[in-house]
Image: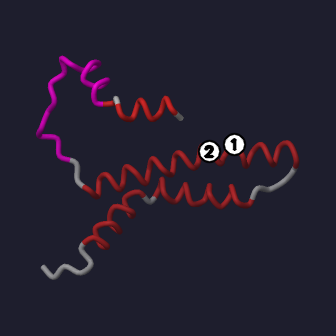
Amino acid sequence: MAAGVVLWFSARALANKIHAGSVVDPSVNISEAGLVRAGSFLIGVYLFVQHLGTTISQWAWGGIIAYGSLSVLVISVGLIVGANFMGKLYKKIKYAGVDS
């Protein structure tokens, strides 16, 4: 945990040291909805990988069906497949009270 905290606070210095000669393109424009879509997809992949092992191991070793992990697997597949929907939902929620 301490190493993670040190890396978090020294990330900028490390990045400058590693990529000192790189040229940053300031014209890169990432929309908020794009970030929501990417984040939803990555969270879905993370949850899928984490709970797939639990589900398979409990079923293979003990014959137990891990219903909690199965429900997380279904949600994670929904996040992976529905990443575009999450971006559209974000836009609808963000601009819900705006009259224009």
Q: Residues within 10 Å of mark 2 (few under 14, many from 20)?
A: some
- What type is the residue that disc 2 sits on? Gln
Q: Is residue 63 above or below residue 100?
A: above
Residue at the spot 43% in from the left edge and 54% down from the top edge: 40
- What type is the residue that disc 1 sits on? Gly
For residue 26: magenta? yes
Q: Is residue 15 above or below residue 49?
A: above
Q: Residues within 10 Å of mark 1 (few under 14, many from 20)?
A: few
Residue on which disc 1 sits: 53
Residue at the spot 37% in from the left edge and 49% down from the top edge: 38
**Side of 38 where 33 appears, left or right:** left
**Side of 19 where 67 appears, left or right:** right
Magenta-colored span: 12-29
Residue on which disc 2 sits: 50
Q: CA distance from mark 2 to mark 1?
A: 6 Å
**Side of 39 where 93 appears, left or right:** left
**2 and 1 marks in contact (CB < 8 Å):** yes
For residue 4: magenta? no
Q: Position of residue 88 (x, y in %)?
A: 32, 66
**Side of 17 where 83 appears, left or right:** right
Is residue 83 or residue 23 the one in the foreground? 23
Q: Position of residue 63 (x, y in %)?
A: 87, 50
Badge 1 element: helix
Q: Position of residue 90 (x, y in %)?
A: 33, 66
Can you say which quadrant of the picture contains the C terminus? bottom left
Residue at the spot 62% in from the left edge and 44% down from the top edge: 50
